[in-house]
Amino acid sequence: MNAPAATTRTTRVEPIIETRGLVMRFGGVEVLRGIDFGIAPGELRCLVGPNGAGKSTFFKCLTGQYHPSGGEIRFKDKAIGGLPSVEIARRGIGIKTQVPSLYDGLSAREHIWLAVKRRIANTGGLLKEVPIAVDEVMESMGIAHLADRTVGQLAHGQRQMVELSMVIGAQPDLILLDEPAAGMTHDEVERLAALVMRLRGTCSLIVVEHDMQFIRMIARQVTVLHQGQVLMEDDVETVLRDRRVRDVYLGKREVV
Ligand SMILES: Nc1ncnc2c1ncn2[C@@H]1O[C@H](COP(=O)(O)OP(=O)(O)OP(=O)(O)O)[C@@H](O)[C@H]1O
Ligand SMILES: [Mg+2]
């Protein structure tokens, strides 16, 4: 049998998630205006842009909370645009939303338990594995000491970590974080950055954040959204130096 012919073609890394011409309209208002976007498996991408740029709307389209008005979303090479949220979560996209979604009366452990149990049940695992897996997640996230506290009693940064632990407990292939550092103390932001760096490579991440010091701690490639379009995409230093980026942030938030 002949050996396969040598090829000089460079292999394109297939993106784990990709959007083509993504459009989201509310009534007559076009909030996402044809977004082409993609990240490689294992990549950590930061998504920045001034208030109202469309970042959260973009995430809501990726996770099925909104049914896009146009364009295409592909995840692991399958079209997912418009699928129900539960189905998209089942396929491996996890999100920490901008608006907290915790049950104040439940403990931190009970929250993680919900996420881990769902994953183990969905993947045909043994439910007796749930408690150990829950402990492992809380240990690795540094929140074991909060396990029995009801989340209503926790500080904002601690609540953010519980939410993040729920996302991680579900072991998604792609994690979307919408302003995870908001309301955190400087120490908490540093811990969060270390955690995000640890996750990189084990899964893919898209992080939306306004805190540019946090962005500098974690970012390599950054995509800038402005008025529902990609304004630019480049390495973090180039983006933060860019005149157009400085202009769109002017008078809103400082780009440091
Ligand atoms: N359900 C909706 N109906 C109508 N307009 C919406 C809806 N959701 C978002 N918008 C509008 O879309 C635009 C983008 O909103 P979005 O929340 O995506 O911005 P963002 O980039 O996440 O901003 P922020 O940094 O403040 O969180 C805003 O003008 C907002 O008012
Ligand atoms: Mg937002």
Image (tube, rainbow, N blue to C red):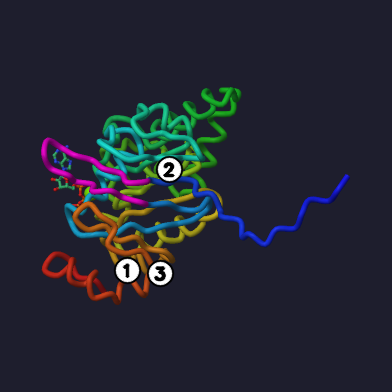
Whether residue 238 is visible, yes or no, is: yes
- Quadrant in which the N terminus is drawn: top right
Instruction: Return the residue nearer the eye: 185 or 26.
Output: 26
Of discs 3 and 2, which sits in the foreground?
A: 3
Q: In the rendered structure, which disc, 2 or 1, sits on the residue that comes first in sequence?
A: 2
What residue would you read off at disc 3?
235
Decide if residue 252 is on the left or right side of residue 13: left
Residue 10 in the image: above or below residue 92: below
Q: Nearer the viewer, residue 82 or 110?
A: 82
Q: Is residue 75 left or right of residue 133?
A: left
- Element carrying mark 1: helix
Q: Amino acid at mark 3?
A: Asp
Q: Which residues are magenta?
A: 20-36
| Residue receiving disc 2 | 165
Residue occupied by mark 1: 213
In the displayed orientation, state which residue is furthest to the right: 1
Q: Which mark, residue 97?
A: none
Quadrant in the picture for the C terminus:
bottom left
Examine the rendered structure and indicate whether residue 190 appears above or below residue 15. below
